[in-house]
């Protein structure tokens, strides 16, 4: 019995020694891993002598068509391309500016209609084959509506009535020389207006359900409305020629 007891004690001691040694090895590995990560982070922050980037157009083919059309519909305004919402909004509480900037810095509309005094009056998103997430669209609908800024979604190849767009953004009729929309365009426009109405109704119900819970209650998560950037996934081939002056 004494021999068995002695063997058990030795075995227990060996197990303890192995556990301590394993913990020591893991601690050394973790410390080395952290040092490598810090060195890697420092290398990333170092600016390269030769940037591994190419110039590209700021708008795709279908987007440029809508861009030219908007410039004709709003000849007395400026049509800005992919302007972040943080450029024309400001938080109520300046102390939370950095927090909200981190949340909204990746949110933008395809086009923003701007007056000569640098005030945005309306925004347009051009939807391609990849579409736009419902959460992203609802976020911009809610945010822009609360800021008094109009918001429309336009499908590629299906332009809405210019008079309706001008009336919504600035309360004026559009250009009389514009041709009337085709039947297919009218149906597409009606379909999108229905989606917009349903989304607004859903948002109003959502806000009503949250009434009394505080204006800053948690809503949708960031992942639900995060907007893809064409820098990471270009929508089409848009490499531009590099011209030297």
Image (cartoon, grey):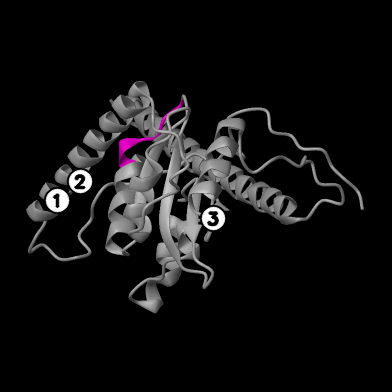
Q: Position of residue 153 (x, y in %)?
A: 38, 40
Kindly identify which residue carries mark 3. Answer: 75
Q: Is residue 189 above or below residue 23?
A: above
Please state which of residues 129 and 136 is positioned toward the viewer in this rendering.
129
Question: x, y percentage for residue 207?
Answer: 14, 54
Measured Cα–Cα span from mark 2 to mark 3: 30 Å
Compare residues 98 and 211 and report the one nearer the observer.
211
Please give the range of residues in magenta: 130-135
Q: Quadrant of residue 238?
A: top right
- Residue position for label 2: 200
Indicate whether residue 11 is drawn in magenta: no
89 above or below 131?
Answer: below
- Based on the displayed image, in which of its 4 quarters is residue 2 positioned? top left
Labels 1 & 2 near each other (Cβ < 8 A): yes
The residue sitting at the front extreme is 177
> Marks 1/3: CA distance?
34 Å
Residue 236 x/y as whole percent:
62, 28
Q: Earlier in the sequence, mark 2 or mark 3?
A: 3
On residue 204, the disc is 1
Query: Seen in the image, is 129 located left or right of residue 209?
Result: right
SS at mark 2 in the image: helix
């Amino acid at each position: 019995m004494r021999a068995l007891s002695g063997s058990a004690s030795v075995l227990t001691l060996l197990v303890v020694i192995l556990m301590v040694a394993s913990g020591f090895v893991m601690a050394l590995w973790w410390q080395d891993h952290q040092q490598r990560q810090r060195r890697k982070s420092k290398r990333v922050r170092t600016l390269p002598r030769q940037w591994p980037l190419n110039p590209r157009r700021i708008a795709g083919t279908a987007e440029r068509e809508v861009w030219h059309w908007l410039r004709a519909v709003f000849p007395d305004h400026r049509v800005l391309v992919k302007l972040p919402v943080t450029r024309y909004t400001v938080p109520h509480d300046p102390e939370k500016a950095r927090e909200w900037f981190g949340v909204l810095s990746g949110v933008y509309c395809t086009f923003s209609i701007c007056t000569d005094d640098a005030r945005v009056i309306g925004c347009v998103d051009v939807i391609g084959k990849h579409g736009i997430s419902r959460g992203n669209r609802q976020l911009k609908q809610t945010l822009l509506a609360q800021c008094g800024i109009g918001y429309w979604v336009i499908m590629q190849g299906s332009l809405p009535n210019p008079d309706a767009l001008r009336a919504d953004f600035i309360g004026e009729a559009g250009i009389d020389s514009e041709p009337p929309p085709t039947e297919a365009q009218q149906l597409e426009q009606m379909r999108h207006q229905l989606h917009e109405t349903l989304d607004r109704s859903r948002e109003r119900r959502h806000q009503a359900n949250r009434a009394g819970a505080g204006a800053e209650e948690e809503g949708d998560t960031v992942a639900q409305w995060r907007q893809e950037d064409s820098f990471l996934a270009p929508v089409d081939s848009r490499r531009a020629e590099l011209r030297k002056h």
